[in-house]
Image (spheres, rainbow, N blue to C red):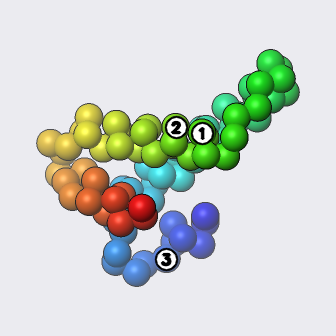
Amino acid sequence: MVAWISLNSGQFSLTLKTLVAQTVIFYIWKERNARLHNSIISSPIVVFKRIDRSVRDSILARSTRKNFRGLLSQWFTFE
């Protein structure tokens, strides 16, 4: 992930990379805590869907900001 963030390919903006990295770390940490403290295990597909939804929601909530314009289309290239 660190290599992807520092890669300057120009395909993905630094704002999107930062947002995705923060979201992935948050949901992995949340999954870890759920497994340790509540014995609740989510499948990798469920965790990915939560990450995907969170990234989309974050982009849509900030769509009027200059740095967030066009990020949704960049995010859709991952699919």
Q: Amino acid at mark 2?
A: Arg
Tell me the quarter of the image containing the C terminus. Answer: bottom left
Quadrant housing residue 14: bottom left
Circle 1 residue: 46
Q: CB under 8 Å between callouts 2 and 1?
A: yes
**Would you call the spot at circle 1 few (<14 residues within 10 Å), some (14-19), or many (20 or more)?**
few
Residue at the far top: name it.
38
Q: Which residue is mark 3?
A: 7
SS label for mark 1: helix
Figure check: 43 above or below 20? above
Residue 20 x %, y % = 48, 52
Which residue position holds label 2? 50
Q: What whole-number distance in Å separates the C-alpha atoms at marks 1 and 3?
A: 28 Å
Extreme residue toward the bottom, this view: 9
In the rendered structure, which amino acid carries the disc numbered 3? Answer: Leu
Sooner in the amino-acid sequence: mark 1 or mark 3: 3
Q: Residue at x 46, y 45 (%)?
A: 52
Q: Nearer the viewer, residue 36 or 25?
A: 36
Give the alpha-carbon distance from disc 2 to disc 1, as whole Å.
6 Å
Frontmost of labels 3 and 2 is 2
The reply to whether the C-beta atoms of the residues labelled 3 and 2 are less than 8 Å apart is no
Which residue type does callout 1 highlight? Val
Looking at the image, is 1 positioned above or below residue 21?
Answer: below
* Mark 2: few/some/many CA within 10 Å (<14, 14-19, 20+): some
- Judge depth for marks 2 and 1 and give the one in front: 1
Q: How far apart are labels 3 and 2 at the CA level? A: 25 Å
